[in-house]
Amino acid sequence: MVQLQKLTPLDDETLEKLGFSWHTDTDGSKYVSDALVSITQEEAEAYYNASNELYDMYVEAAEHVIENDLFFDLGIPFNLVDVIKKSWENDVHWHIYGRFDLAGGIDGQDIKLIEFNADTPTGLFETAMLQWALLKHNNMDENKQFNNVYEAISTNFKRLITLLDDVDEFDSRYDGWKILFSSISDNDEEEVTTKLLEQMANDAGFVTKFEFLENTNFDENGVYDADENSYEYWFKLYPWEDIAVDEPELATTLTNILQNQEAIILNPAYTLLFQSKGMLKILCDLFPDSPYLLKTSFEPLENTKQVEKSVFGREGANTAIVDENNQLLEKTDGPYDNYKKIYQEYVDFPKDREGDKYQAGVFFAYEACGLSFRKGGEIMDNMSKFVGHVIV
Amino acid sequence: MKHISSIAGGVALGTAGVMMMSVLTGCEAPKEELQNRFLIIEQQTNGKYIVVEEVPTEGPNRAIIREKDANGNTVERFMNEAEMKALADQEYQKVQNGTSETIHDNGGSAGMGLAGTILAVAAGSLLGNMIGNALMNNKSFAKNSARTNKSSYSRSSASKSKAKSSSKKSFFGGSKKSSSRSGGFFGG
């Protein structure tokens, strides 16, 4: 049973003052739970260790995919292969942050990898800021949370300059290079998330600016804001695979920008390899004994309760759960059906008294840096709720 | 807990933490500094005004208003702090009764009436931080404020025509695809 601690919630007005406007879901229900998941220090440590180990495994698996030309297996759009390879060749294409989605880890259940959101993870404001604010608001000990997300990402921005060297070198090496941050307009959540990342970079010492995607300009020589100022870095909260499919000309331009070393795009194109759920199968091939992996295949698993997913897909769409007799138990529709499928062994999430299920999200920025939970049903969809945590 | 760090006193939240703590403790820190400005405000062909120059100043707030006369000639007039404050006050009254254009979404077009423009860019320094911050918490006001100020969003006609002739391209025109909150919080 998931252990919960009831809270006095933050009212909507305060949430909005904090910059958090997406507090109510489209069905009118509150998106933020009025309880915290209680975890032990050991459980927090286990999430930390699992995520760090999983990241190392992903890096090894990506190397394997590139060396053996397995892009097609992962469902990678062909027009991104070059830019992925180029981004992989040089450390300057530094991965800023990602989020592992994990089953288990509490209530005596083993930690299992569900997937890695490595390209455009959201839930960032909630994890880095909001769950801390909930502790503060309830006069609880702020030290009792696995949450170093803000500082870890801010520090990781410095590594764009220092790479593997000591980040203290940043000040002496940084020469005014600018980062442009972009998200689509008309989406508060993505705008706030992107601006939070901008603030982290700004705190790190970078010159930054925000420009909506529609107003950002591109040519072979770089990336520009609406006033035609050019930038050395461009962070986009927009999926690489959507650029490939919806804006193929831009995919070509970005490839040339990288080739000409005119700008660095964040998160780097190779994070699409991590993002592909096809990677779960590659990981199983390479690390068959890992305790963190669920059996995953490109073909349906025999006599196994399993989950069918598209290699790229969001918000729980186009997901199906079938039992060991191949009987369909649950299914969601959506726009991602055209993508290749993978089949992942089913694992039950930890449940609370009401039977709601909890999935852990661990943010990663050079190392695991923060934890939060999602509460929902069998398939975590866009109606799932955010739940913070406290270490007891 | 050797590896697991948490946020002690919000310190690790950087500048974002300062804002968070000020909201949570109910004593919001000034977002807009009491910095006086020297503004050049220009009337556009559609009659609306935008700020084309903004210079921090040690002296009082003041502005040059650049307008077209009946013959289409550009005329400039000077506005002192008292006059600016009177206009800002007048517009703030409209904010309070809900009729000010500064708090309405004007569909993305830049520029407002003169009083609205002055309030949008200098509310804090003219009427005090409390009013300035309260206004900036209104999303439409914040947007209008940004759009009215050339230094951040609005562009002069010269740079617009340059953009048109440039080979740079923008994308995402029709795309409203969201990268989504869940970003792949898939169950299973």
Image (tube, rainbow, N blue to C red):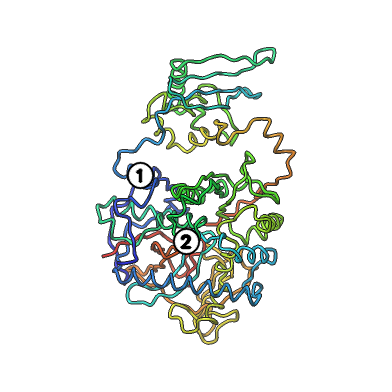
Question: In screen coordinates, is B101 left or right of B134?
Answer: right
Q: Amino acid at mark 1?
A: Val
Q: Which mark is residue A165?
A: 2
Q: Residues within 10 Å of mark 1 (few under 14, many from 20)?
A: some
Viewer-closest of A286 and A86: A86
Question: At 32% from the left edge and 69% from the top edge, which residue is drawn?
Answer: A2
Q: Quadrant of residue A1?
A: bottom left
Q: Which residue is mark 1?
A: B18
Report the Cα–Cα distance between label 1 and label 2.
Answer: 29 Å
Q: Residues within 10 Å of mark 2 (few under 14, many from 20)?
A: few
The image shows residue B55 at horizontal and vertical percentages of: 51, 27
Using the image, name the chain to which the residue with label 2 belongs.
A
Question: At 31% from the left edge and 45% from the top edge, which residue is drawn?
Answer: B24
Question: In screen coordinates, is A105 left or right of A162?
Answer: left
Q: Which mark is residue B3?
A: none
Circles 1 and 2: CB atoms closer than 8 Å = no
